[in-house]
Each structure stands twice: as C-alpha cells, then as structure tokens.
Image (spheres, grey):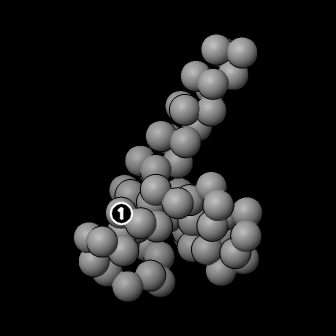
Amino acid sequence: MRILLLVLIVVYAGGVWKFWQGFHRTSFERGIGNQIALSLMWPVLYIGNKSYRQNFTKALKGR
C-alpha cells in the first residue's frame, strides 16, 4: 500500500514538474497564477478536458 502511494506521489510530482517546464509550449495564457493552477490540477484536467490533454502532451513532448 505504501509503495503504491509513493508511486502515485512520484507520478504526480513528475507531471507537475514536466508540465511546468514545458508550459511555454502550450496555448495557455502566460502568468504565474495560471501556470501554478494548471500544473497542480493536471490529473483532473487531463482526464476531463481534451484541449488540456493536447496542451499537456505539447508541454511534455515539445510538439
């Protein structure tokens, strides 16, 4: 159980970090507040929003 929690935390933190680093590649409005919110909420937005999913992929892969 603890190992699963650790894996989830690592995946979440990795997603936040990668999205933060590639934010400039997205079509989202630049701004620290926007960048923080979109980075921290990535799992929910990734599941529920097609446009966010496409931008998230751009941020991570550089496309």
The C terminus is located in which quarter? bottom right
For the point 58% across and 37% down, the residue is: 11
Coordinates of residue 43 in the picture (x, y in percent): 62, 55
| Nearer to us in this view, 33 or 27 | 33
Q: Is residue 49 above or below residue 36?
A: below
Please tell me whether mark 1 sits on a helix, a strand or a loop.
helix
Coordinates of residue 5 in the picture (x, y in percent): 63, 24
Q: Is residue 21 visible?
A: yes
Please identify the residue farthest to the front as the structure is shown.
1
Indicate left or right for 10 with 36 as reference: right
Q: Residues within 10 Å of mark 1 (few under 14, many from 20)?
A: few
Indicate left or right for 6 with 33 as reference: right
For the point 26% across and 70% down, the residue is: 32
> Which residue is under mark 1?
36
For the point 46% across and 67% down, the residue is: 38
Examine the image and state in which quarter residue 2 appears: top right
Indicate left or right for 61 with 36 as reference: right
Please identify the residue farthest to the top as the structure is shown.
2
Q: Amino acid at mark 1?
A: Ile
Q: Is residue 50 above or below residue 23?
A: below
The N terminus is located in which quarter? top right
Examine the image and state in which quarter residue 28 appears: bottom left
| Nearer to us in this view, 21 or 43 | 43
For the point 70% across and 75% down, the residue is: 49
Q: Is residue 54 visible?
A: no
